[in-house]
Image (cartoon, rainbow, N blue to C red):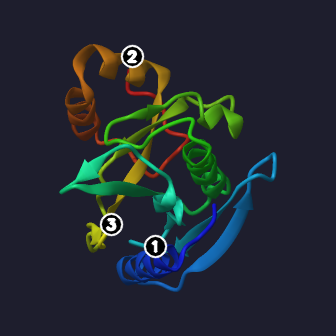
Amino acid sequence: MEQTYSDMKQKQLVLQRIKEVFENPIQVGTFESDDEQASVEIVKCPDSPFEGVTSYSTVGVFQCQNLLTADQRELNVEFMGICDTRNNWFDGLLSTCAFAMIKGKVRAHPYEVYKDIIPIYQPNIDMKHVLLIPPFSLRHELDIIETDNRVITWLMLNPISENEYAFMQKNGYQKLIDAFVETNIDIYDLYRKSIF
């Protein structure tokens, strides 16, 4: 992705917001796509928002066209997520979602499901898909960043199972989220069992 001066300034704003919200010292890594045609930066912040979990965010995915608008400006997204610190492949999962977006294979809308993305990393666990939701459980809101030409926001990766996905297709995302709250799932545990 070719960067303009405006993109670089906006990228700095994104990184600054992440630092403010995650609070703890961050580490920034670069992931290359398998075909080496794209790369993405991912921020990792251990023990944020609390000890034992790690927060992650992409930086720069907002430059991908998303076909959504807000107040006549492009609405662009970054991906973020939080998981148990013992997990060592969540940043890879985040990069796979980002590459799908960068290569124009998917768009990022709230409550959209990226199917069969988790088995790339862990084929034998209950969690199979990623449900994109507005971020929660951080100490501060990531909120939005408004610029002249775009509005930048974040979507959070929420892993779900095949049965949970089927339930959502039948009953809607709100019913699935209600069921998660009711059963008090550990949202940070990618190895959790499916609730259905």
46 with respect to 36 (left or right): left
Identity of the residue furthest to the top in this view:
170
Residue closest to the eye, 24 or 195: 24
83 with respect to 68 (left or right): right
Look at 39% across and 16% down and name the residue there: 166
Pick the quarter of the image with the N terminus. bottom right
Which residue does the numbered mark 2 point to in the structure image? 166
What's the CA distance linking mark 3 and mark 2? 38 Å
Near mark 2 (Cα within 10 A), the count class, few <14, some 14-19 or many ≥20, is few
Residue 81 visible to the viewer: no
Local secondary structure at mark 2: helix
Where residue 30 appears, as percent x and y from the top left, is 70, 67
Question: Which label is found at residue 149?
Answer: 3
- Please tell me whether mark 1 or mark 3 is closer to you in this view: 3
Precedes in sequence: disc 1 or disc 2: 1
Snapshot quadrant of residue 146:
bottom left
Residue closest to the eye, 107 or 25: 107
Which residue does the numbered mark 1 point to in the structure image? 51
What's the CA distance linking mark 1 and mark 3? 38 Å
Residue closest to the eye, 196 or 113: 113
Precedes in sequence: disc 3 or disc 2: 3
Q: Is residue 5 above or below residue 165?
A: below
Where residue 48 appears, as percent x and y from the top left, is 44, 73
Look at 61% across and 31% down and name the residue there: 125
- Please tell me whether mark 1 or mark 2 is closer to you in this view: 2
Q: Is residue 155 above or below residue 161?
A: below
Precedes in sequence: disc 1 or disc 3: 1
Labels 1 and 2 touching (C-beta < 8 A)? no
| Residue type, numbered disc 2 | Ala
Look at 52% across and 86% down and name the residue there: 25
